[in-house]
Image: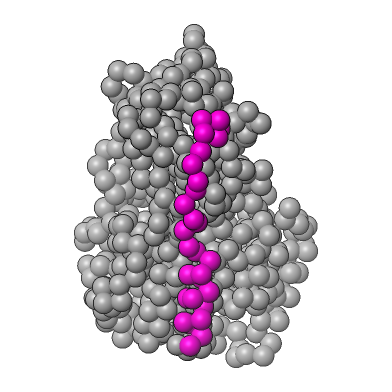
Amino acid sequence: MALRFPRKALSLLLSAAAACASAAGPEPFSRSAADFVRDEIHVGINIGNTLDVPSGNETDWGNVPVTRELIRAYRAKGFDTVRIPVTWDRRFDHDAPGHPIEPAFLARVKEVAGWCLAEGLVTIVNTHHDGAWQLIDGEHEERAGELLRDLWTQIARELGGAGERLVFESFNEVRKARGYGGPDGRQKGQDDWTGRAEYFETVNRWAEIFVEAVRATGGNNAKRYLMVPTYAAGFQEATCAGWRSPEPDGDRIIADIHCYEPGDFCLWGDRKKHDPAHAAQRLGLFFPLFKKYFTDRGVPLVLGEVNAQHRFLDALHYVPNEAERMKWARQYMETARSYGFPVILWDNGGGFDMGLVDRRTAQWTEPRLVDTFLGAWHGRLDDATFAKWVAEVEAKNVPPPPPGPGKAADVALRWAVGGPDNYSGCWGQSMGYGNVNGNGAALKFFTFAADGSLHVDTHGAGGNMVHQQFWADRGLEARRSWAAWAAGHPATSAAGRTLHCALTAKNGTSVLVKGFFLVPGLGKIPFGADNDRPGCFLATPERPTVEIDVPLPAGDIDLSGKGIGAELQFIPGAWGRNLPLDADLTAVEIR
């Protein structure tokens, strides 16, 4: 549990941290932003998917509350900067004059920032997933500016006693966003990540409001370094050219861009292996633009989010591509260093797709990858050391030996989305999507029973329909998302057999099983009910429990190293009613 300090103690902590941080360096706030970034910000890390959870609850996306031990681990590893993404939407009054922030939440943000400053880390605090009110739609821009001004006035006043290592960032990836509407919750349009001139102007105007609000609070905030992203934090030439400094006559503004490149390796594609020529082409396309539009004009630039998703080279046996990510990281960081661009890594918690550190224990989950990020940027990584690290990682990530033949009795399914220390698998092996009161699936708890039952609690989600996908393994202990399978699972033929389970809907919810599928790694082979075709299984308040029997695919299908997936669609009992959308899958077996 994170320690709580009285308000006075927190203020003393912030002041002491500021004094220690600047004692041996130049006079506080005496440097230009460019000199400050050059001297202080090199390699940082985001505390992602925690204080930025749209519900306002730190743990709702599967991480534990931030601890001081975690912050100390950042400093001990060699990071010099921490970015603290914060979503304020559910934590301030949208209707009251001045739009007051909940005091406890503001104190919590101040507490975490204080820990970072006390460790001598540059600490960046922002507004993050606040797109529910910060809308570019031709109707709400003026109100969004009013809310932004009031929020930053309060944040700046509360945290403003800190020294120069506290940096405020106006917002995150603000853009013209897709909308949702109607009982079906379907999207109306798409997010516009590229933008156009009128959108750039709106974001530039909001950045000016942010700067005005912070400066008006006086004290250290009158000269504080402030960070402002491009439209959508995008890296295309149009978004770079469309960025305008909100304080053109000053030297206190830092630009921010999020550059997950190459995108088909880092984010959205299926490229599992690092291709140095491809990476060089992509970085060679964008980094010169950053130099042209920012650093050549005297504006320091920080790459505020960078990482590559965890993928599997051997999906059947969950062999990760950690060594490939290390090769990419070395090239990326050495290139960024050559341009003088600091990099802040995106981390969403160990076990998740970009996780680097286990927040529960403050232990690094991929230590050699992190060592590569740090060593490459600082120019300390020689070829021999790197080759040794790669060999070390590749040696531990090899497929298990083929299993021996099995028998029917060997097939015992146990749902395994998480474990006793990780009850939420959101963004991991269970993915919430759709719209729940405008904020996505508020997935929270999974619990398990000895008989293999899975109990799902979506924690107050209501409004539109929610889809969830769950994986079941073959009798393994409950495990964290994306963990490796142990070797030696007996092979079992599925031909001519049936998957049996019982589905129970709870709390007035209707639950539709849209399909079951085999899971060879991340792929899936649908069988049984599929989408909206006849054969879907529905539990309703009137018939809360249904028995399900689904024939497995024909042919000789080896279940070794595979799991069974189920896709569920939760439907609230009444439109807009805010209630837990709960269901149980029990009595799971193959007959």
Res. 147 in view = no
Which residue shows up at 39% across the image and 60% down it? Answer: 313
Near-viewer residue (387 or 370): 387
x then y, percent, for residue 73: 66, 70
Vertical placement of residue 384 versus 113, above or below: below
> For this view, does 587 lie left or right of residue 143?
right
Is 244 placed above or below 145 here?
Answer: below
Q: How is the image coloured?
A: one colour
**How far across and down, in percent of the image, does residue 305 sit?**
43, 66
Query: Measured along the vertical axis of the image, is residue 454 above or below residue 346?
Result: above
**At 44% from the left edge and 70% from the top edge, which residue is drawn?**
323
Residue 133 placement (x, y as % from top left): 41, 45
User: Is 310 in front, or is 257?
Assistant: 310
Kindly identify the residue that appears in the image at 36 percent across and 45 percent down: 523
Is 408 part of what is drawn in magenta? yes
Asked whether residue 487 appears in the rendered view, the answer is yes
In the image, 403 versus 52, the foreground residue is 403
Q: Position of residue 272 (x, y in %)?
A: 35, 62
User: For residue 448, which quarter of the picture?
Assistant: top right
The quadrant in which residue 282 appears is bottom left
Start and end of the magenta stretch? 384-413
Where, by quadrant of the figure, is residue 438 drawn? Answer: top left
